[in-house]
Image (cartoon, grey):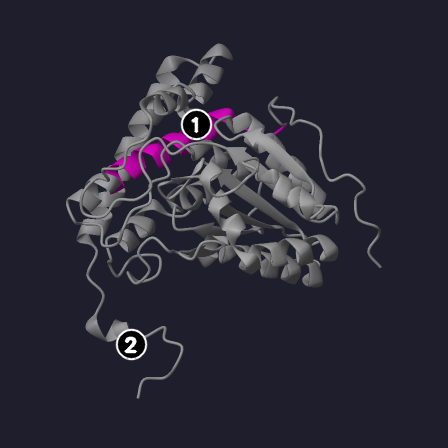
Amino acid sequence: MASALPADPALPPVDARPVDGFDPVAAYRTMVLIRTYEERILQARTEREVIGPVHPYIGQEAVAVGVCAALEPRDHLVSHYRGHGHALARGVDPDALTAELFGRADGLCGGKAAALVSDPATHLLLSSGIVGAGIPVAAGAAMTSQVKGDGAVAVVFFGEGALGAGVVHETLTLAVVQRLPLILVCENNGYQGATRTEEVYPETSVARIAEAHRMPVHRVDGNDTLAVHAAATAAVAAARAGQGPSFIEASTYLTRFHLQFDRPSGEHRPAEERADWLARDPLGRLRQHLLAAGTAPAVLDALDTDAEQRVDAAITFARTSPWPAPEAALTNLWAATP
C-alpha cells in the first residue's frame, strides 16, 4: 500500500556543484554537437533539403544534456517537436537522424517522420507534435516499468505551454497518486509560440502548478548544465527509490526563434531581452567553467572541430541515402490496405 503523500512538495534549492560521475567535458562535447547540428539543419531547411518545419533548440542545450547525463540506457525518453537536442543528448545516431529530416530511406523512421522521430535503440519512445501529448505516454512507460519492476524511469520534455492541456493535469494527478517513476522536465523559455507566457498564465513560475498537484519540484537555471544535471540526478534517484515523480522547471530561452519553414523566421523579440540571455548562453557558461577548472583551450577547440566534422558527415550521409520506395507509403499503417 502506498504511504501518505509528502506534506510539503517544495524542495530546497538545487546544489549546482558537479555531481559525482558527471563529465563536464563530455557534456560540452554533446552541447557543441547539438548547437552545430541545429545551425546546419536550419541552413538545410532554407535550402529545402529538410522536408518538414524546423523548431530550433538553440539556447536550450543545457537542459537536454544535463538531464540525459543522469539517465541509464534502460530509461525511457519522450520528446516533442523541438527534439533534435534531446535525441542527440540521448545518443541517437546523427546519420539516421539527419536522413530522417531529409526524408530518406535510411532515416530513423524510414523517412516518414520528419522531426517527430522515435528510436527503440536508445529508448526514445516518441517525439510528439501535439503539445502535451507526450506526457501521458511517458507516464505509461513509467507505469510499465513500475509493474515490471525493471528499475527504469521515464523522462518527458515539454514546454510550459503544455501545462494548459487538460490531459497533463490528469497525468500529474495519476503520477503522484501511483508514485510513478516519472520525471517531468518543463523547458520554460518564456514564450508559447510567439505569445509571452505571462499573457497566458497568471503565474509564470509554472512549477507552482506542479506543486498544486503535490508533486516535488526542482526549480533550476536551465542554462546552467551543472544545475540541471544535479536536479535530474536527484529526481532520478527519487524515482528509482520508489518515491514517485518529480517536476523540474528549467528556466531557459530560445535565442533564435520558434519555428522555420522555407525561410528563416521573421520573428522578433526585445533586443535587450535577447542580449541578456545571449550573455548567459549555456555553451559559453560551460566553456568558462571548464577553462576555470583547468581544461586547456585547445581541448575545447578540438571538440568544436570534431562537432563540425561529425555534422558534415551526417549531412553527406543523408544526401546520399536513397529516397523511400513508393510502396513504402503503404507500410506502417494502422489498417490493412484495401
Q: Nearer the viewer, residue 306 or 276?
A: 276
Q: CA distance from mark 2 to mark 1?
A: 42 Å
> Can the viewer see residue 13 in this picture?
yes
Mark 1, Cα crowd under 10 Å, few <14 / some 14-19 / many 20+, is many
Q: Are marks 2 and 1 in contact (CB under 8 Å)?
A: no
Tell me the SS state at disc 2.
helix
Q: Residue furthest bottom?
A: 338
Give 67 or 59, whichever is nearer the viewer. Answer: 59
* Residue at (54, 38) in percent of width and height: 67
Q: Is residue 204 above or below residue 162?
A: above
At which x and y percent is residue 156? 53, 49
Q: Magenta: predominant secondary structure element?
A: helix
Residue drawn at the location 43% of the way across and 21% of the way down: 280
Taking the magenta stretch, the answer to whether it contains residue 38 is yes
Q: Is residue 308 magenta?
A: no
- Give residue 197's position: percent from left, percent from top: 46, 39
Residue 28: numbered disc: 1
Which picture quadrant has residue 61? top left
What is the quadrant of residue 298 in the picture? top left
Residue 209: x percent and y percent?
62, 44
**Left or right: 110 as drawn, with respect to 214:** left
Q: In the image, what residue type sits under mark 2? A: Leu
Residue at the disc numbered 2: 330
Residue 150 is at least partly visible in this image: no
User: Who's the residue at 23% across and 65% down the image?
Assistant: 324
Task: Tell which of 309 and 132 is nearer to you.
Answer: 132
Return the residue nearer the eye: 193 or 119.
Answer: 193
Q: Which part of the image, by quadrant, shows the C terminus?
A: bottom left
Task: Give the quadrant of residue 329.
Answer: bottom left
Q: Nearer the viewer, mark 2 or mark 1?
A: 2
- The magenta segment: 20-41
